[in-house]
Amino acid sequence: MKMINALISTARGWVGISFSEKGVRRLNLPVPNKKEALSQLGAGHIADLDKSDSMDGLRRQVVEYFNGDKVGFHCRLDLSWS
C-alpha cells in the first residue's frame, strides 16, 4: 500500500501527516520545524498536500484548526494498521 507523507505549516508549527488511498493513517501535533515533523512521521519523503486529490481540503481544515477556529474534519481514516 502506497503511503503519502506531507507537512503542513500552521500558526502553531509544522504538522506531519501520513495517508494512503484509504485515508489518514497518522497526524502529528505541531512542532517547531520541518525536520522534527518529518522525523516524527518516520518518513524520508514528503509530498505537497495541495496537489493530492485524495485529501482535498484537509490542509485547509488543519490550518484552520490550529488557528483556533472550530472545524469539523471531513476525511476518511485508514485504520487497517490497527
Image: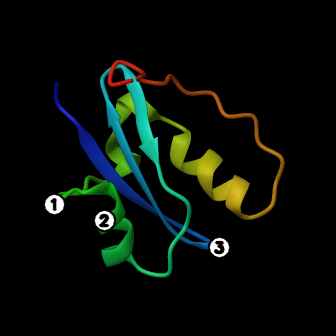
Q: Which residue is mark 1?
A: 44
Question: What is the CA distance from the residue labelled 1 to the residue labelled 2?
Answer: 7 Å
Q: Residue at x 33, y 44 (%)?
A: 51
Q: Of the two numbered discs 3 and 2 on the same chain, state the one appearing first in sequence.
A: 3
Q: Amino acid at mark 3?
A: Ala
Secondary structure type for disc 3: loop
Question: What is the CA distance from the residue labelled 3 to the residue labelled 2?
Answer: 17 Å
79 up-or-down from 18: above or below:
above
Q: Amino acid at mark 2?
A: Leu
In contact (CB < 8 Å): disc 1 and disc 2: yes
Q: Residue at x 42, y 80 (%)?
A: 33
Residue 75 - label? none
Q: Please tell me how crowded label 1 is: few (under 14), some (14-19), or many (20+) other residues with Cα within 10 Å.
A: few
Q: Is residue 69 left or right of residue 27?
A: right
Question: What is the CA distance from the residue labelled 3 to the residue labelled 1?
Answer: 24 Å
Q: Amino acid at mark 1?
A: Gly
21 up-or-down from 47: above or below:
above
Q: Which residue is mark 3?
A: 11
Seen from the viewer's position, the closer of residues 58 and 79 is 79
Q: Please tell me how crowded label 3 is: few (under 14), some (14-19), or many (20+) other residues with Cα within 10 Å.
A: few
Q: Which residue is mark 2?
A: 38
Q: Is residue 73 left or right of residue 50?
A: right
Quarter of the image holding residue 10?
Answer: bottom right
Q: Residue at x 32, y 56 (%)?
A: 41
Choose mark 3 or mark 1, whichever is in front.
Answer: 1
Q: Of the two numbered discs 1 and 2 on the same chain, state the one appearing first in sequence.
A: 2
In contact (CB < 8 Å): disc 3 and disc 2: no
